[in-house]
Amino acid sequence: MLSLKSVLLSLFLVLPIMHAEPLTVLLGTFTRGDSEGVYAVQMDTETGALTEAKLVAELENPGFLTRHPKLPVVYAILVEKDSSGSQVGGIAAYAIDWKTGELKEINRRVASGGTFAHLAVDPAGRRVIAASYGGGYVTAWSLDPDGRLGEGGELIPQTGTLGPNAKRQNAAHPHSVTISPDGRFAWVADLGLDRVLAYDLTGAAPLPQPHVDGDAVSHAGAGPRHSKFSTDGKSFYVLNELDASITVFGYDAAAGTLDERQQLSLLLPDYDGAVSSSEIRTHPNGRFVYAAHRGDSTIVIFSRDQRSGKLSRLGAVPTGGKTPRNFALSPDGAWLIAANQNSDTLTTFKVDAETGALTATGESTAVPHAVCVLF
């Protein structure tokens, strides 16, 4: 008669060993040198190891990507030329197989102004909004039920008083779009105006309307670049590029308004190098905020007070490459991938959900001019 130990051992030997499913990660790039468009890698969710990058869409300068909130569809900014030869901005919609990263183009739309820096889709999947840094405007297209880009493309110029940095704040420079968790409002961080302009999305898609009461002003010379809501929707974090600071706002969801609560720097008092922040992310557990600084190629870690939303700097870790233009946290918050633009590399970090600490895995893969990470 077999012992219980023998039975369990025999079952262990015949049962298949279960491995966690890898995660597909898409990479937007600047198509200079060897880059040809959008790439995909697979990340091992047990080790953080990355596969070799695979080209999944040939596209000119897909510098930012986002995904549809409900459908297997992703959107990429692109650059085309009009009849006069001038560069204009556009968006391409792709159906995606998230198991492989394979993309199949659905359709594309092009606006008549300058190229885009950023785009966002509202939580209901009704519209996509894009910001043109060089053109000084925002625009939007409606989305069909299958994720196809529909009507839209009218230009909404950003206007206001310019900041004091004559070189970088010589015009309106809308750099990113962030939509409220309930999809009622959007905020456009404008580096040139030292302002985050608010838009009302409650009307008929696609065109948003100004929501002046929701505008937020950054301190002079800050240069707002990117922003994120906390997971509980009560705090709004604006990352300022020009002085590498974060402005913390409380958020009134009913009114769609922001009230400033804190300003703090990414940098230590004795820092004397180049200053240029790039991306900000909030951890899914609501306890930590991360921001990238290109000046010294680091990710800066902040703890978050879950009552007030205020931040405290915990430290910084090198990204293992040069010039981290973008990074992203995995949906479960267990991993962070940094895109190092000027070393053509992706690097992975294990995230400690209790302390917020980032531990470099030593895993890296080559992606030419990687500037956007999308899980």
Image: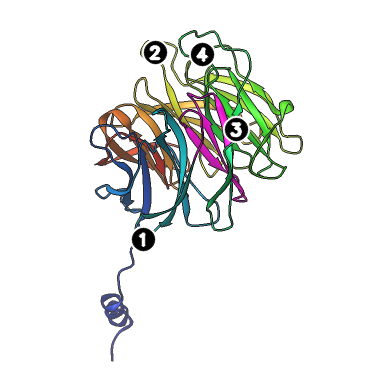
- Residue 27: image quadrant is top left
Q: Earlier in the sequence, mark 3 or mark 1?
A: 1
Residue at x 54% of width, y 44% of height: 285
Give the left or right position of residue 197, taking residue 169 as reference: right
Q: Which of marks 2 and 4 is nearer the N terminus?
A: 4
- From what the image shows, is residue 161 above or below residue 45? above
Q: Which colour scheme is used?
A: rainbow
Mark 4 and mark 3 in contact? Answer it, CB < 8 Å. no
Instruction: Give the residue type that dot 1 points to.
Output: Ala
Can the viewer see residue 332? no
Pick the residue in front: 32 or 152: 152
Q: Which mark is residue 271?
A: 2
- From what the image shows, is residue 202 above or below residue 211? below
Give the mark toward the camera: 4 or 1.
4
Quadrant including the N terminus: bottom left
CA gap between label 1 and label 2 equals 42 Å
Q: Is residue 137 magenta?
A: yes
Give the mark toward the camera: 3 or 2.
2
List the residue tagged with mark 1. 20
Q: Residue 169 carries which label?
A: 4
Give the mark toward the camera: 4 or 3.
4
Q: Which of marks 4 and 3 is nearer the N terminus?
A: 4
Q: Position of residue 330 (x, y in %)?
A: 43, 47
Badge 2 marks a residue whose secondary structure is loop
Instruction: Give the residue type that dot 4 points to.
Output: Gln
Pick the residue in front: 84 or 117: 84
Magenta span:
110-139
Can the viewer see residue 339? yes
Q: Which of marks 1 and 2 is nearer the N terminus?
A: 1
Badge 4 marks a residue whose secondary structure is loop
Q: Is residue 113 magenta?
A: yes
Instruction: Give the residue type that dot 3 points to.
Output: Asp
